[in-house]
Amino acid sequence: YKMYKTHVMSVFLSVLPDLLNEIEASRTPVEMRALLERATRQFGFEGYSYHRYVPEDGSLNYIGGWPPEWLERYESNNYVDIDPVIERLLGSVAPFTWNEAVARRPVNASERQVMNEGREFGLKEGAEIPIHEPGPGFATFSVFSSVAADFEAAWEAHRHDIHLFCLHFHDKY
């Protein structure tokens, strides 16, 4: 296992600079979204989402791979107001897993409902990469997988690298 992990890491180390260079070279939102999709898979995750709050007009922009039914449910039920991951997101600058968001605090029934319903839509394990801009703007990247062991291996191997990638992506997008 250690030899495999070392091989994976050495291969990855040669990929991150290429991905960062591709961010710089990207010219359109379509190119950027395709790069984000590919990078997410290269990092070992099944999917991603990117939410950016734009304070000038109060909009929340979204791109990503949440199941459409989950996105609709999340928005129509205003889960953003009760999601315990959002609470942690607003107070953190470092990436964290969804499990870490609730590990050291009591979780009430409505918060538990949000987490459980997300799992029903295949968002079994995930993490957030918070990005705080100067002023009130912010964004977050989510990476997720439907298989816990796959997520944990990818997160352990690449959490710092995806953090760096997401910062560069956000700056350009």
Image (cartoon, rainbow, N blue to C red):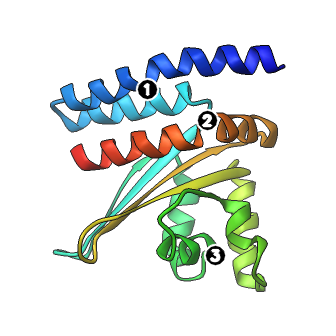
Q: Give the secondary structure at mark 1.
A: helix
Residue pushed farthest right?
Answer: 1
Where in the figure is residue 6, as x and y percent of width and height? 70, 18
Q: Amino acid at mark 1?
A: Leu
Q: Amino acid at mark 2?
A: Phe
| 142 sits to left or right of 7 | left
Q: Which residue is mark 1?
A: 16
Residue 53's label in the rendered image is none
Q: Which quadrant does the N terminus fall into?
A: top right
Seen at 71% across and 40% down, the residue is 151
Residue pointed to by mark 3: 84
Snapshot quadrant of residue 139: bottom left
Measured as percent of width and height from the top left, residue 160 is found at 54, 43
Amino acid on which the number 3 mark rests in the picture? Pro
Up-down relation of residue 12 to residue 68 (above or below): above
Q: Nearer the viewer, mark 1 or mark 2?
A: 1
Quadrant for residue 30, please give it.
Answer: top left
- Is 121 in front, or is 3? 3
Residue that numbered label 2 is attached to: 45
**In this picture, is 152 found above or below 30?**
below
Rounded to the nearest angstrom, the CA distance separating label 1 from label 2 is: 15 Å
x, y percentage for residue 47? 56, 39
Q: Can you tell which of label 3 and label 1 is closer to the viewer?
A: 1
Give the Cα distance between marks 3 and 1.
31 Å
